[in-house]
Amino acid sequence: MKITKAFKVQPGSTVGLDSIDAGFHGKYASGAKAAAHVAGNLARITELQRKLYADHRHALLIVLQGIDSAGKDGTCWHVISAMDPQGVEVHGFKQPTEVELSHHFLWRIDPHSPARGRVAIFNRSHYEDVLIARVHKLVPDAVLEQRYGFINEWERLLAQQNNTTILKFFLHISKDEQLARFKERLKNPAHQWKISEADYSERDRWDEYIEAFDIALTRCSTNHAPWYVIPSNHKWFRNLAISQIIADTLEQMHLELPKPTVDIADMTRRYHSDVAATRGKKKTEHGKTR
């Protein structure tokens, strides 16, 4: 199975999340069976992201979306952590402030788009403004409909004007799996801080959120910024799929280390000269000590 193609939302297709198996795990029976594959992907990501940083011709934007407890933080911890922190920034976009609300909805997003050579992770993103806004009817329908087009154009701008590759991952879990994860949060003291009133109040709107995601995935999966629906009931399979797509995408950039900006032969001669001088100085000092 070619994961990069299997989970990609083809532009022009219609998404129905209810028909997609959130528990899919391919040929792997367990996380232990997939561990070597995941480790290989992470090693590739480490090497290639460092090349991206040095190459300085490309940028990478990774968007993580999903219903509450889908695993956005877990993806950052288990996949994105393979990258060198000096070349990566993670941003989360939740409820906008009063200042942000006084601007157009992409105003708060644009400053965090990645510069060439860097990776930006959006843990929740500009899509909140067509998801929560739709479910809670925060803007008129006419405004909401315009936003899909504005999002597509903004992403096109990044791709065409800044050589930004955009990967958008929807972490797909079932309603039963979400409830199981809520239970784990309640039982595990290390995760209890994540519990909020909204977890259960928003769960009551499950069907409305799935419909909102269906629309966003359908309207905004483009050739320059595709969506991937990642089966995420099994966290280990989520990590496997996302790490492989990121690694494959980085490889397709044909990244290159830049050529040295100095004369390597001259630098080598200077190095050996410094080594010889240092050794000579140490011998002289040793003789004086004696």
Image (tube, grey):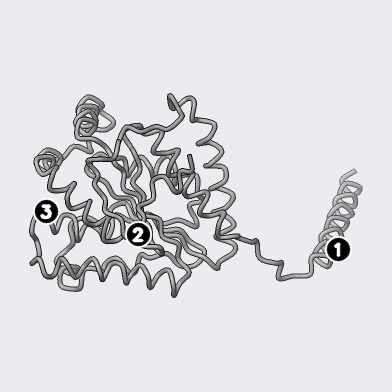
In the rendered view, tell whether residue 3 sits above or below residue 48: above
Type of residue at label 2? Pro
* Of marks 1 and 2, the one in the foreground: 2
In the rendered view, tell whether residue 169 sits above or below residue 277: above
Query: Callout 2: 10 Å neighbours few (<14), some, many (20+)?
Result: some
Q: CA distance from mark 3 to mark 2?
A: 24 Å
For mark 3, give the secondary structure.
helix
Residue indicated by mark 2? 11
Closer to the N terminus: mark 1 or mark 2? 2
Q: Quadrant of residue 134?
A: bottom left
Q: Which residue lies at the image location 11% right of the left edge and 53% below the top edge?
A: 135
For mark 1, give the secondary structure.
helix
Q: Which residue lies at the image location 54% right of the left edge and 31% below the top edge?
A: 36
Image x and y of residue 44, in percent: 57, 46
Q: CA distance from mark 1 to mark 2?
A: 56 Å
Query: Callout 1: 10 Å neighbours few (<14), some, many (20+)?
Result: few
Image x and y of residue 22, in percent: 30, 36
Image x and y of residue 94, in percent: 22, 55
Instruction: Say which mark, if any, is on residue 135.
Output: 3
Image x and y of residue 249, in percent: 50, 54
Closer to the N terminus: mark 3 or mark 2? 2
Q: How many marks?
A: 3
Q: Nearer the viewer, residue 54 or 192?
A: 54
Type of residue at label 3? Val
Q: Is residue 21 left or right of residue 76?
A: left
Quadrant of the frame with the C terminus:
top right
Type of residue at label 1? Arg
Q: Which residue lies at the image location 40% right of the left edge and 63% below the top edge?
A: 223
Q: Which residue lies at the image location 52% right of the left edge and 64% below the top edge?
A: 117
For mark 2, give the secondary structure.
loop
Residue indicated by mark 1? 269
Q: Nearer the viewer, residue 263 or 73?
A: 73
